[in-house]
Image (cartoon, grey):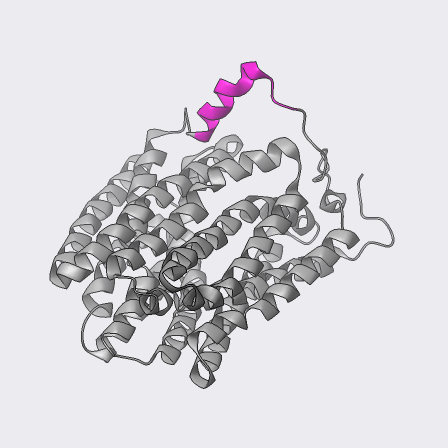
Amino acid sequence: MSGPVRSAPSAWRVVWWFGFVSLAADMVYEGARSVYGPVLAALGASAVVVGLVTGAGEAVALVMRLAFGPIADRTGRYWSLTILGYGLTAVCVPLLALAPRLGAAGLAFATTMILLERLGKAIRSPSKSALLAHVATAVGRGRGFGVHKALDQVGAFAGPLVVAGVVAVASLWWGMAVLAVPGAVAMVLLLTLRRRVPDPSAYDDSPTPATQQQPAEHPADRRGWWAEVVGAGLPADFFRYAVAASLTTGALVTFGIIGYHLTVDGLLPVAAVPVVYAAAMAVEAVAALAVGSVFDRTGPRVLLLVPVLVALVPALALGSALVAVLAGVVAWGVAQGVQDSTVKAVVADLVEAPRRATAYGVFAGVQGLFAIVGGVTAGWLYERSVPALVAVVALTQVVALALLADTFRRSALRR
């Protein structure tokens, strides 16, 4: 099929619809993530548990893409996986409101809901990106994905503010329950879009429709498929860079720990924590655009700033002075924004086009493994010695800085 049928919506309209789905869904999970620290603390969690849960959540969202990307490609069930992934987010986050009613089981229930929500992210992300890529071809993939990301960030900013308002006038748990509303909106939009645009490949010249099921893999090919999953044959410079970038990911203290610190140390009321998170989301969006622009003009050496920022975060954000803590949150937002955008651009310079999808999957997997180790370590050290946590993070970032500089030197990466 070479073009959309006459009754189908325009490509731009579909891009915007995808963007509004992400906006509503981001309100749900970013609104919840803004208070995961206080939520878990209210259920009796220690800093170690907060670090473990939030770190494991990030690991699930990254590592499991190694499985669900190939599953989507092999089955062709892009829409089904997208709907399942968003459905987990829409259902699991509001269910957190039930946790305090479950007594001793409340913490385990909340942990399960948080991890299932992050699993939903892993399930839907590869499939949603594949669907959107088809449609964005008709409007320019850069502009299409850019509009989608902008709407995504609007949700990431608005969700925490909604939670802050509800927590201020009601309670933390009503703040979770109210997120059922944008969750329902996201699902209605998504199901409507699925009905109106069953085959997004109609918007480009792809020879294989996005909804077409692929033939089952022959047993003889299984070894090759697993080799692809673990990145066999990718350049050594890629793996060196993946480790360096993952050291910054793993050492970046999660906002769950920061929110826990703000609440337990009495630096801010619970209702103010999601406002701080919303501000961090705004900083993240600006940083992603600004550093991305500098990267295009000057090359990857701008990324040598990331380990410096990551090292500053615990030194500032886990202190006792509110001004320093807020400065640390700004550093966290900048580092997060660069890691979610520009850091990934270097992969395209290190790996040839036919292997880039595999490379990005491996890259996310390595980041996920470092994220869970970093989350547990940060929580454990926070309870024992914040100066020790600061020192350990700084040491890992010296290693990351050296690896990044060596990778850029060996690869002669430049613009």
- List the single residue furthest toward the front: 103
Out of 175 and 321, give the one closest to the viewer: 175
Residue 118 magenta-highlighted: no
Which residue appears farthest toward the right when viewing the image?
A: 6
Q: Please determine whether, in this image, residue 93 is positioned above or below residue 222.
A: below
**What's the magenta region?**
216-229
Quarter where residue 368 is shown: top left
- Residue 400 percent coordinates (x, y): 24, 46
* Residue 345 in view of the camera: no
Residue beneath the point at 87% across and 52% down: 6
Q: Position of residue 201 (x, y in %)?
A: 72, 43
Residue 50 appears in the rendering = yes
| Residue 1, horizontal then vertical, whole percent | 80, 39
Is residue 117 placed above or below 63 in the rendered structure? below
Left or right of residue 271, residue 141 in this image: right
Residue 387 relative to residue 346: left or right: left
Q: What residue appears at the point 33 percent right and 60 percent down from the top-left corner?
A: 335
- Tally of numbered tags: 0
Compare residues 300 and 124 and report the one nearer the observer.
124
In the image, is 346 to the left or to the right of 356? left
Q: Is residue 218 located in the magenta-colored stretch of the structure?
A: yes
